[in-house]
Image (cartoon, grey):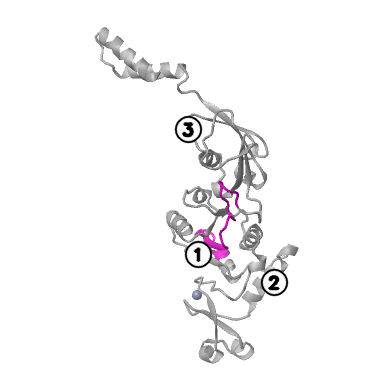
């Protein structure tokens, strides 16, 4: 239609001795808009459970009408409304399961659900738990959480100088779950498995991640280095005795050493603290924040 009008205007312009100048082009666009060429469409969205955490208060727990004026995928619209795609477990479009790539149509009713813990991902959508082992890539702003995960025995990539694009690439290449408090990071297309950590304190963050990924059965303190993420191996006391404080040398016999950086570990206050936290998590108990 717009092309036809443009040709018509050009012909009219030529007949009157004009070129198709800027005014003619603008007229073409106005005519196209009036004829329906730029009609704005609307879809209705409803977000469920903890996905509401990402919405402004006035939009939570209710239907949201959102206009759109171009071909848009569900991923882009859901993220434009504030919800990072790795947080989404399941989408219904007009009552039918839909994937992120589905185009939004005028009048669509879109229901968006979080990942249901322990159920894994739903085919076609992808979610944080889907087929990925509990290996993490921790954002630069969550260093204490990364150290605590390592103390619990979990593989947690962490570098306080890492850039967002590097974090996304490594998480993608190594099939790691991204943990972050930056929702912009989670919107990166390369990231398929990720979680926005809600809690502020490191202890509460650890409890949150443990619950989210059901980590209790797999926690193994004293198996991974909190400093560098390397594996710990048993070491003879005689080989490291000169590095020990007098009291440790006297009372501790069982030592482990990081195979990457050489850091020594034993069942001291840090490890007892993390073990108490793991044991107590189900009962909502915690441990000191100094871990
Ligand atoms: Zn180490």
Q: Which mark is residue 157?
A: 1
- Spatial CA distance of label 1 from label 2 is 24 Å
Q: Residue at x 43, y 57 (%)?
A: 166
Q: Residue at x 26, y 7 (%)?
A: 15
How crowded is the residue under tag 1: few (<14 C-alpha within 10 Å), some, or many (20+)? many
Give the SS element for disc 3: loop
In this view, the mark in front (1 or 2): 1
Q: What span is in magenta?
A: 121-146
144 to 99, vertically: above or below: below
Using residue 66 as the reference point, say whether residue 33 is left or right of it. Answer: left
How crowded is the residue under tag 2: few (<14 C-alpha within 10 Å), some, or many (20+)? some
Q: Earlier in the sequence, mark 1 or mark 2?
A: 1
Q: Residue at x 51, y 25 (%)?
A: 40
User: Percent x, y for residue 153?
Assistant: 59, 71
Residue beneath disc 3:
71
User: Could you tell me which quadrant the N terminus lies in?
Assistant: top left
Quick check: marks 3 and 1 in contact, CB under 8 Å? no
* Residue 271 sits in quarter: bottom right
Q: Earlier in the sequence, mark 2 or mark 3?
A: 3
Q: Which residue extends farthest right?
A: 283
285 to 247, vertically: above or below: above
* Residue 106 sits in quarter: top right
Mark 1 CB near ligand 1 (8 Å cut): no
Residue beneath disc 2:
276
User: Could you tell me which quadrant the C terminus lies in?
Assistant: bottom right
13 falls in the magenta region = no
Q: Which residue extends farthest left?
A: 17
How crowded is the residue under tag 3: few (<14 C-alpha within 10 Å), some, or many (20+)? few
Q: State the count of labels.
A: 3
In this view, the mark in front (3 or 1): 3
């Amino acid at each position: 239609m717009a092309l036809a009008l443009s040709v018509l205007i050009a012909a009219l312009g030529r007949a009157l001795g004009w070129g198709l100048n800027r005014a003619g082009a603008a007229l073409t666009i106005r005519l196209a808009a009036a004829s329906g060429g730029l009609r704005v469409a609307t879809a209705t969205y409803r977000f469920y459970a903890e996905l509401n955490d990402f919405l402004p208060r006035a939009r939570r727990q209710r239907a949201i009408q959102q206009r759109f004026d171009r071909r848009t995928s569900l991923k882009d619209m859901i993220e434009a409304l504030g919800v990072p795609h790795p947080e989404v477990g399941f989408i219904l479009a007009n009552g039918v399961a839909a994937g992120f790539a589905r185009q939004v149509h005028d009048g669509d009713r879109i229901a968006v659900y979080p990942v249901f813990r322990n159920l894994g991902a739903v085919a076609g959508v992808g979610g944080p738990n889907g087929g990925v082992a509990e290996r993490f890539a921790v954002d630069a702003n969550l260093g204490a959480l990364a150290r605590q995960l390592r103390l619990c025995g979990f593989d947690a990539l962490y570098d306080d100088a890492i850039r967002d694009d590097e974090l996304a690439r490594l998480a993608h290449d190594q099939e790691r779950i991204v943990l972050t408090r930056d929702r912009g990071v989670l919107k990166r297309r390369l990231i398929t498995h990720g979680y926005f950590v809600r809690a502020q304190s490191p202890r509460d963050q650890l409890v949150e991640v443990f619950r989210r990924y059901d980590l209790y059965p797999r926690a193994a303190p004293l198996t991974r280095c909190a400093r560098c993420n390397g594996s710990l191996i048993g070491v003879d006391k005689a080989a490291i005795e000169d590095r020990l404080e007098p009291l440790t040398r006297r009372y501790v016999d069982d030592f482990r050493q990081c195979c990457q950086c050489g850091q020594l570990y034993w069942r001291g206050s840090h490890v007892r603290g993390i073990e108490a936290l793991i044991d107590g998590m189900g009962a909502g108990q915690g441990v000191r924040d100094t871990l």
